[in-house]
Image (cartoon, grey):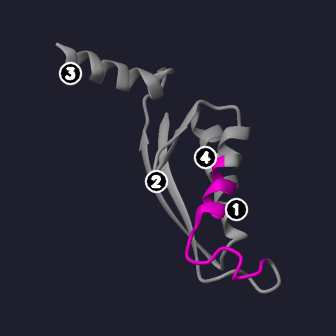
């Protein structure tokens, strides 16, 4: 499966966890914490300006999404998660394969 997801903290830092002035209005530090979890997972992944995509088996991908959400949770009292999944049992390499097929179609 491929999962595209986006995480964002809200509600301010939990009491005692962070200096609320350290990050201002930007969520880049929280996003970096989530992307670090994804990259450390060893699963194929790609990050764009709005989503991170990760490919693997259901349980392993969802475990990484959960861990990434927990990492973002350190930056606020709430976490927003947007997730889209392409579930195709038995398929691998689709993170790049789908884009390669699109590029071939555009070149035709």
Please name the residue shown 47% across and 45% down the image. 48
Taking the image as shown, residue 14 lies to the left or right of residue 103, namely right
Q: Which of marks 3 and 1 is in front?
A: 3
Marks 2 and 1 sit apart, C-alpha to C-alpha, by: 15 Å
Quadrant assignment, res 41: top right
Question: Can you name the residue that lies furthest to the left here?
Answer: 108
Q: Name the residue under label 3.
A: 106
Q: What kind of element bears circle 4?
A: helix
Residue 107 location (% of width, % of height): 21, 16
Which residue position is annotated with label 4?
A: 62
- Pointer 3 with pointer 2, Cβ within 8 A: no
Split into 4 quadrants, where in the image is the C terminus?
top left
Question: Which of pointers 2 and 4 indicates the residue nearer the eye?
Answer: 2
The residue indicated by pointer 1 is 70
In magenta segment, residue 31:
yes
Dot 3 or dot 1, earlier in sequence: 1
Q: Mark 2 points at which residue?
A: 83
Tell me if residue 94 comes above or below residue 46 in the rendering.
Answer: above
Q: Which residue is drawn at 65% across and 43% down?
A: 38
What distance separates the C-alpha of mark 3 from that of mark 2? 27 Å
> Which segment is the magenta one?
18-35
Horizontal relation, residue 21 to residue 98: left or right: right
């Amino acid at each position: 499966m491929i999962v595209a997801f986006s995480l964002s903290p809200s509600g301010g830092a939990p009491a005692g966890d962070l200096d609320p002035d350290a990050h201002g209005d930007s969520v880049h530090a929280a996003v970096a914490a989530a992307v670090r979890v994804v990259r450390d997972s060893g699963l194929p992944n790609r990050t764009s300006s709005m989503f991170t995509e990760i490919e693997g088996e259901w349980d392993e991908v969802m475990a990484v999404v959960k861990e990434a959400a927990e990492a973002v949770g350190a930056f606020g009292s709430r976490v927003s998660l947007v997730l889209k999944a392409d579930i195709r049992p038995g398929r691998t390499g689709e993170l790049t394969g789908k884009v390669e097929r699109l590029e071939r179609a555009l070149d035709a």
